[in-house]
Image (spheres, rainbow, N blue to C red):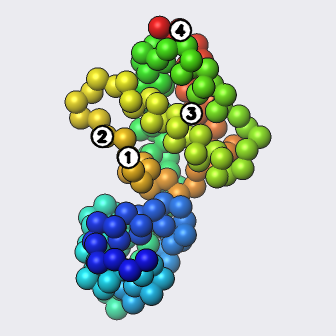
Amino acid sequence: MSTGSGAAAYDRLREAIVRVELEPGAAISEAQLVERFGFTKAAVRAALARLRADGLVLAEPRRGHVVAPLTMRDVLEIYDVRLALEPAAAEAAARAMDAGEVTRLTKLARTDVDVAEFLAANREVHLAIVKPSPARRRPAAPSSGPRTPRRSARPGHAAAPGARARLTFRAAPPR
């Protein structure tokens, strides 16, 4: 995968951080990233600058770059924001969907899946919630997942907000 694109390097490195391919707290160097991911040094440098701006990578003196640690406080803040926004968004989206789409999404709410299936279903549900939103400031369908550094999403963890949102989603009448 040899490319000089800073944007492509940013997308791939961000994905590696979000999916914990690059672990929180891990020291990373430009040379390591060039070798591992096949981008040019300039592309990696540009990607690291954007990742620093996003708060996903920290620059540390005499150590180089470090993948930002994800603290329990970070996780709680992320879930507090999500809990405030997602149930109302799910309810509004469910009202705007036809019955077939509601049925399709309801089938995705299974607990007997592996992490990869959970993440795929989670993405589908979240994209379906965003799609009918009339909000002018909502992002276009994300190509690389959510912008928050959710590195610990696993089935069965932080289930209370998700369970509540699923109940809200199921209770909303289809249009």
Disc 2 to disc 1: CB gap under 8 Å: yes
What amino acid does circle 1 point to? Pro
The answer to whether residue 40 is left or right of residue 38 is: left
What amino acid does circle 3 point to? Pro
| Crowd class of label 1 (few under 14; some 14 to 19; many from 20; radius 10 Å) | few
Q: Nearer the viewer, mark 4 or mark 3?
A: 4
The numbered disc on residue 142 is: 1
Label 4: element kind: loop
The answer to whether residue 128 is left or right of residue 46 is: right
Label 3: element kind: helix
Q: Is 103 rendered above or below residue 124?
A: above
**Dot 4 corresponds to which residue?**
173
**Dot 2 corresponds to which residue?**
139
**3D distance between C-alphas at marks 1 and 4:** 27 Å
Q: Is 138 rendered above or below residue 58?
A: above
**Dot 3 corresponds to which residue?**
161
Image position, residue 99 (x, y; %):
55, 13
Disc 3 to disc 1: CB gap under 8 Å: no
